[in-house]
Image (cartoon, coloured by chain):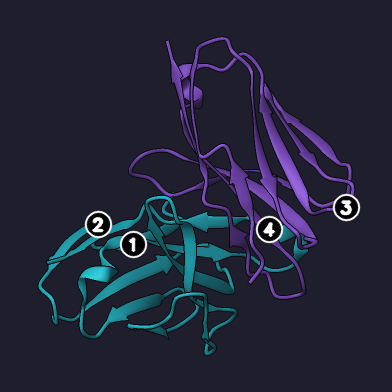
Amino acid sequence: TQLLEQSPQFLSIQEGENLTVYCNSSSVFSSLQWYRQEPGEGPVLLVTVVTGGEVKKLKRLTFQFGDARKDSSLHITAAQPGDTGLYLCAGASGGSYIPTFGRGTSLIVHP
Amino acid sequence: NAGVTQTPKFQVLKTGQSMTLQCAQDMNHNSMYWYRQDPGMGLRLIYYSASEGTTDKGEVPNGYNVSRLNKREFSLRLESAAPSQTSVYFCASKGQGFSGNTIYFGEGSWLTVV
């Protein structure tokens, strides 16, 4: 089983602060995804990264895939209360797409 | 826009009772999945189906059975529910090919076994 370690597990910050969430593994992944989950709902895909060193931006969110494709980070600039949620990373390798999920980072942004 | 639909949304069972969680997707996806989500444990794969007519065990299959009834539907059955199966269950589906690696999740089914 490929393991994905996410850190931190919990994050409570004030509106306007910056934050970074990390997703690390000893395994190499062919692709890595970040999901956001709000209470009472299923996870929703934010981004997929596939190339080592790749950086993708989604408004105030910046996603980076490590050069060795073993780790990834999510950076949020000037966090807003609407960013509150559970952030999950998921990695997959091989032809059959069976992603392994990290345990998630629970983010609370206070107004 | 339905996407992935799960029923029921909430269910309380007594230990030893059986039940089936239903899931249907309207996106013509080949792959379907059942996950459970527990506090601090993330999403763990119970079973998946790469295509109609095939099913395979995931990380935590014990105590569950699945049926891929057709391309649209993938059901999860608990034959004899145990308190350890109290969890939130998510059904998901995925399209074909590498470019279609977006997994779409249902809204979840909250199951409590007492």
- The residue tagged 3 is A68
What amino acid type is highlighted by mark number 1? Gln
* In the rendered image, residues at marks 4 and 3 fall on the same chain: yes
What amino acid type is highlighted by mark number 3? Ala
- The residue tagged 2 is B9
Q: Is residue B83 above or below residue B39?
A: below
The chain displayed cyan equals B
* In the rendered image, residues at marks 2 and 4 fall on the same chain: no
Identify the residue at horizontal 86%, vertical 41% (top origin): A54
Q: Chain of mark 3?
A: A
Question: Which of the numbered marks, if any, corresponds to residue B6?
Answer: 1
Badge 1: residue crowd in 10 Å (few <14, some 14–19, many ≥20): many
Task: Pick the residue in front: A30 or B97.
Answer: A30
* In the rendered image, residues at marks 1 and 4 fall on the same chain: no
Question: Which of the numbered marks, if any, corresponds to residue A91?
Answer: 4
Q: Position of residue A49 (x, y in %)?
A: 77, 47
What amino acid type is highlighted by mark number 2? Lys
Residue furthest to the bottom: B53
- Indicate the quadrant where residue B74 lies: bottom left
Identify the residue at horizontal 60%, vertical 79% (top origin): B50
- Indicate the quadrant where residue B46 lies: bottom left
